[in-house]
Amino acid sequence: MNPLDVRKVLIIKFFGIGSLVLAEPFFRQTRKLFPNAQIHLLTLNSNRDVMTLIGGVDHVHFVNLGAHIFQAIGAFVGCVVNVFSKRFEVVLDMEFYTRASAVVSLASLAPVRIGYHAQGIYRGSIQSHRVPFNSYWHVSRNFLSLLEPFGYRVGTVPAVPVLDLPQAPLAATQKFVESLNGEAAAGRFIVINVNAGELAFERRWYPDRFAALAAHLSIKYSLPCVFIGSPGERDYVEQVVQGVRAQGGLAHNAAGVLGLPAMAQVCAKSLLVISNDSGPLHVAAATGT
């Protein structure tokens, strides 16, 4: 199939704010490869904010899994029916750990269905083109490899994600940065993320060690430490913040206060971001922090 003749492309990437950030070079290249096509993305509702910072996609379809299993099943069935009705010509399945995306890919009945062939995740012959997942490559390069059936060749130059941040400071960003006045000399502060998402608690460093590190940096360099996180992580973050203050450091709990776009702007203004392996790490890196 000639990429110039393709009119409708579906990209499937359900999980991970960080993964979507790392997929930005892939979205950008997909846009170039299919210049005459509408590019659609199917993802979870929890990724709504991050998609405001990522270009290259014309339409984003969000799946809300809800609060319990029956809502999740209903949402998934609705998603499958919706994809079937759209009549996509090309489906690019970016998931490499789950089989659910392969079911959606099959339901599309698209003539070209591209997905990963990875050890331990058997998907049979659902995909028309199976691309090896290279565990020695950065995930951004692996994402780009999904375009190889159309003649694209993944280069050796690292694929660096770039976020489309608002040029002017958001109201939440401005308000928070101004609240640091008096503590942050010349606007200098550091950002710390102690969380690692609900699916990867094992990636969290010990909170007392984060507190000790933050207190040390705050005292030595006279810097306030801004701790970020989601609303559900606020209590956990507060424990670390109190640990920093108990050791004489300056610390602020911004978990749940800053939405993702404002958090990205705050990271971009900071001197340094320290983070577990999670979405905010990749957001901060993509802002050039």
Image: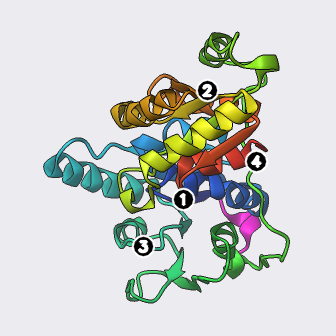
Closer mark to the observer between disc 1 and disc 4: 4
Q: Which residue is mark 4?
A: 162
Q: Is residue 22 left or right of residue 232?
A: right
Q: CA distance from mark 1 to mark 3?
A: 19 Å
Q: CA distance from mark 4 to mark 2?
A: 16 Å
The relative height of residue 113 versus residue 129 in the rendered view (above or below) is above
Closer mark to the observer between disc 3 and disc 2: 2
Q: Is residue 267 visible?
A: no
Q: Is residue 93 left or right of residue 264?
A: left
| Amino acid residing under circle 4 | Val
Q: Which residue is mark 3?
A: 97
Sequence-wise, the earlier of marks 1 and 3 is 1
Q: CA distance from mark 1 to mark 4?
A: 22 Å
Q: CA distance from mark 3 to mark 4?
A: 25 Å
The relative height of residue 20 versus residue 89 in the rendered view (above or below) is above
Tell me whether the residue at label 1 lies in contact with that at label 3, contact meaning CB atoms closer than 8 angstroms: no
| Amino acid residing under circle 1 | Leu
Per the rendered image, the range of residues in magenta is: 1-7
Q: Position of residue 44 (x, y in %)?
A: 41, 48
**Which label was assigned to residue 248?**
none
Q: Which residue is mark 1?
A: 10
Q: Is residue 158 left or right of residue 214?
A: right
Q: Secondary structure at mark 4?
A: loop
Q: Which residue is mark 2?
A: 262
